[in-house]
Amino acid sequence: MFDLTDLLIKLIPVFPLLAVISNGLFGSRYSHEIAHRLAWGSVALSFLCVIGVFADVLSSRVSHEVIAYQWIFGGDLTINLAYLVDPLTCVWLLVVTGVGFLIHVYSVGYMHGEDGFTRFFTYMNLFMVSMLLLVMGNNYVVLFIGWEGVGLCSYLLIGYYYDKVSAAKAASKAFVVNRIGDAGFLLAIFLVFINFKTLDYTKVMAQVSQLSPEMATAIALCLLIGAVGKSAQLPLYTWLPDAMEGPTPVSALIHAATMVTAGVYMIVRNHAIFDMSPIAMEIVAVVGGCTALFAATIGLVQTDIKRVLAYSTVSQLGYMFLGCGIGAYTAAVFHVMTHAFFKALLFLSAGSVIHALSGEQDIRKMGGLSKKIPWTYRLFLIGTIAIAGLPPLAGFWSKDEIMGHAFVNHHYLYYTMAAVGAFLTSFYMFRLTYLTFYGPSRMDHHTEEHVHESPMVMVGPLMALGVLSVLGGLILGFPPDHGWLHGFLAPVAAVAGEHEASAGLILLLMGAATGIALLGWGLAHFLYSASPATAESWSTKFAGAYNTLLNKYYVDELYDFLFVEPTKRLGELLDWFDRTIIDGLVRGVALMADWGSAGSTWIEKYVVYAGLNVIGLGNHMAARQGRRLQSGMVHHYAALIIAGLFLLALVVQLIIQL
Amino acid sequence: MLEELAASFPILSCLLFLPLVGAAVLWLVEDEDMVRTSALTISLVELALAIFVLIRFVPESAAMQFSEHASWIPGLGISYHLAVDGISVLFVGLTAFLTVLVVIYSWDTIRQQIKLYMMCVLALETTTMGVFVSLDLILFFVFWELMLIPSYFLIKLWGGGAERHYAALKYVLYTLLGSVFMLVGIALLNLNFHQWAVLHHTDQVYSFDLLDLLTVPIPLSQQILIFWLMFMGFAFKAPVFPFHTWLPDALLEGPIGMSVVLAGLKLGTFGFMRFSIPLLPDASKSQTVVAILMCLGIAAILYGAIMALIQPDFRRLLAFSSISHLGFIVIGLFALNYQGLQGSLLTMINLGFSTAGLFFIAGFLYSRQQTTHLSAFGGMAKQVPLLASYFLLIGLASIGLPGTNGFVGEFLILLGTFKANWVYGAFAVTGVVFGAAYFLWYYERAILGPLGKAVKSTMPDLQLREMIIAVSLSVMILWIGLYPSPFLRIMNGSIQALVDRLDHGTVASLTDSVQRQDH
């Protein structure tokens, strides 16, 4: 039976895949123009398909399951390459293809004139394919293909400037740290298969109530390990700040808007399992809350514009995990969406700043840019207000909803963590804005002369994201807890037994959140605009704390000391062991055989060759002298052994029977 | 249900002896270019025959197909019995495929005695084919031992290292030592058959035929003894940790062509799957055997991976990565369930593309810098982008990235192991992390970063012949990774039969279910 929606679903990942094949294999034969048109054109086509599918899901409220082909099978296992499109998938599809499209267009301008222009777009399209598989798969293994696929693209794009040592190192680090998470994810997949005898979501979720609480906890925690790796949460977050080595559009698409939210997707997708395990939920919330706070503190003092944004991403992902951990799945997904809008906006505007300053990323060498690049400034400011959580911009609604859930359900500790985090967020974001766009210029003369506003192909997507950052929250999630998104996601993410807050409490919490954000802004204004000297004096007064933050709590150094170096030492020790002990034994045996050979020559001559003659297998060879045996002629040994061993076999048999 | 489908035309014999006859013909050729062309033609015809066998092979069937049977030494029950089933037929294709690539690779990289070299390569192909298609254990053993002769000369005469004589001898003696024990095991199987046959007054009193041996019960204590004897043969050859020290030497000192065959064709673990497990099912699933093999496998995974992490020479790194991969295969085999066995078999085939592929890459590196040591490389991605790309693709296959063949095999192995015993599974999964680490770290230092001091800016990118090798390997890697269905269908029947055999053991004899339809 032909179904248009099923066809559209199948087509979604096909367009970018075709672009990958074309640009990857033949990209060097045609111009950059054709390459980038293929790249963003294919994403646009996917986006159109997504709109079609979305319209169908929206009107019919039916989820679609489509099998592309049978992939791995045998015995009691069948894994199809198959898709499941339900409201949850729709949300991610819209974000991935929609924001993805805008970032592709922006990249045309940003990457203009780069050496590996076509290579860049090939990797970006490959990322789109992987990310689409990730969110569209109807089973854990397809999710895992996408999961590692986006990891590969992240590796390739972080290492885009591969001749830079730091980029190459950051790329490997990202992949290997992610693999730690992936190992946990694999364990979760195996546990699911053992318990349910299937890996399809719908079949698993149908039987999920039969799971014992212990097993639910085990599966949930293994999944969490995977999510923590991909979404850069404590303790596996260290790869994400380093990932800023990649070109800025990559940071926006992969390391802010889409890939890093895959962990949230995975948890929401499996929320039925998590719901069965209060311990696992508690751990998710603790991980999220701690990460939100921890990363925000590091963000306070960083001086690289992209790294501030990177730590802010880690921190915001923490909010989403916190939301999941307290059962506010819809709020978490809501925050994924608004974050995709304003964080992509912030990264791309930062890219526009970097572009304008011929590659400068250090905010100590910026300042006073608001007049020179007004559009970039305005849009960056919108992003800042949105992430800081000031109404009515997008970030306010989603962050407030997570915090509100924490408060209403009596998770006061988490609420406090989130509130402090929100204050820090507002502070470091306005600090970044002040240092970049206000005050006197700290640029060197040469850079200053070349400052220019970015071309329309870059500013256009920024404007679109700016509109979404302003209105996105209102459209999707207003009124709080009863917005459009809540209704749409109700079939897949609703949780029973939630406390409903009174209207008064909601307003009070909103007021508090706004106040917190304003407080952060005020402090930033005081330190970085009104009284810059105070900022200087504080950094010397609290030098210990300042340096700890500046060095990111020395976590990288700690991991090196605890894991990387010991593994290398162990490798060297094993290498010695291998050469000296294991191989030493082998040589020892050989030496003994050598000593014994004087005696055995006699045996060879009079016993074995006699045996050869008796059995009659190698008699033509046996006529020769025993000395030839020492000549290293292999086939002599071989023939000798074939014959001699029959004798030995008989002897052994006799012994056994006695 | 071990059915046999007799061949109307002795195609397996053709496959078996064509390269050997070809080698003999090469002897008569004088001109060096003619030698190359003839060797290529022979290996291509062989590949065509192998593909024909694969196409005509009936999938989803446990039957022994294309069976040929002739008496050889009737007094001892030794026969010339060839056939392929889902376990062995893919190896036939793989052997033919890799030989073609080796011939292409050696085209201009072998500068001395090309005729003798090609003869050795073709002779090696015959003996390897023999190992895969023999059903008679003595016939198998003969090929198993004969393999050593061309291998020995290939390492000794065309090896690049200073220690090649030592490496060649070590390889040969090591394998021979293992074979000694294996032969005792084979003899014991024969004698066990004999006792049973005499007791039941059957016509045939001696047999080395796998299908005959499968029909008689073997007492457990006897099975365990034979298992460990066979183990020595297969584990030394594979090599299973800790019997591996010949491998780094042989791979580092020998010529690339030999390394491709040594590392690409997993003869030792094939032996476990072909003979040990079906012939000795009760021993194979006895607690001690499983525990020891699982521990050796996991030790190999971690030991190999951590060793690979610090190796500065790419070929030595690959040797230890092979040891690590063999650990995966071993645990998959001794998970003794469907996914484990299926994954192990697929991984054996996969490594024929990925590990062998990385050895070709090592060869490409070697022919540019005359070494595979890290000090000679660095930042070459700009100079040799194609080489860098295929290096990455094949490397990602070897660390099991989804979308490549490596993932399908590794996933099945880990799933099977986890099903059998989650503790082993959990340990084995950590290998996934180390695998990524050792490959990417080497790749980062050799290919990425700023241009190394020893790298000339004129370094040429992949040439035509190198491209043929890289592309054909990549096609196979992606094919099995994205659409493994044809391969899985070929092996499924035999895997199911193996699982059934393990369920029933030897005591419930299969006598009645064996139908012999040949002749």
Image (cartoon, rainbow, N blue to C red):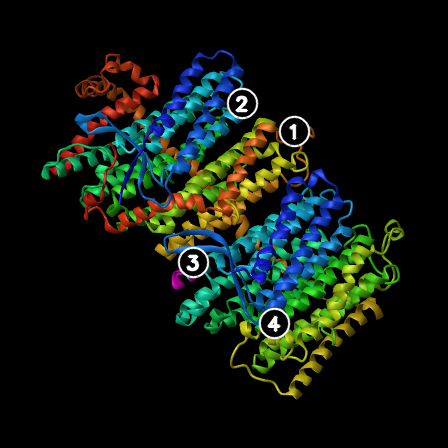
**Label 2: which secondary element:** helix
Evaluate whether label 3 is on the same chain as label 2: no
Residue type at tag 4: Ser
Q: Nearer the viewer, mark 2 or mark 1?
A: 2
Residue that appears at 52% across and 15% down: B32
Query: Separation of disc 3 and disc 1 at Cα?
Result: 46 Å
Which residue is outermost to the front?
A: A1
Quarter of the figure with the C terminus of chain B:
top left
Disc 3 residue crowd, few under 14, some 14–19, many 20+, Cα 10 Å: many
Name the image quarter holding residue A499: bottom right
Q: Which residue is mark 1?
A: B460
**Label 4: which secondary element:** helix
Task: Say which label, 4 or 3, has the lower sequence index.
Answer: 4
Instruction: Decide: is A57 above or below A144.
Output: below
Instruction: Decide: is A649 above or below A316.
Output: above
Q: Which residue is mark 3?
A: A190
Evaluate whether label 2 is on the same chain as label 1: yes
Asked if the magenta segment contains residue A194, the reply would be yes
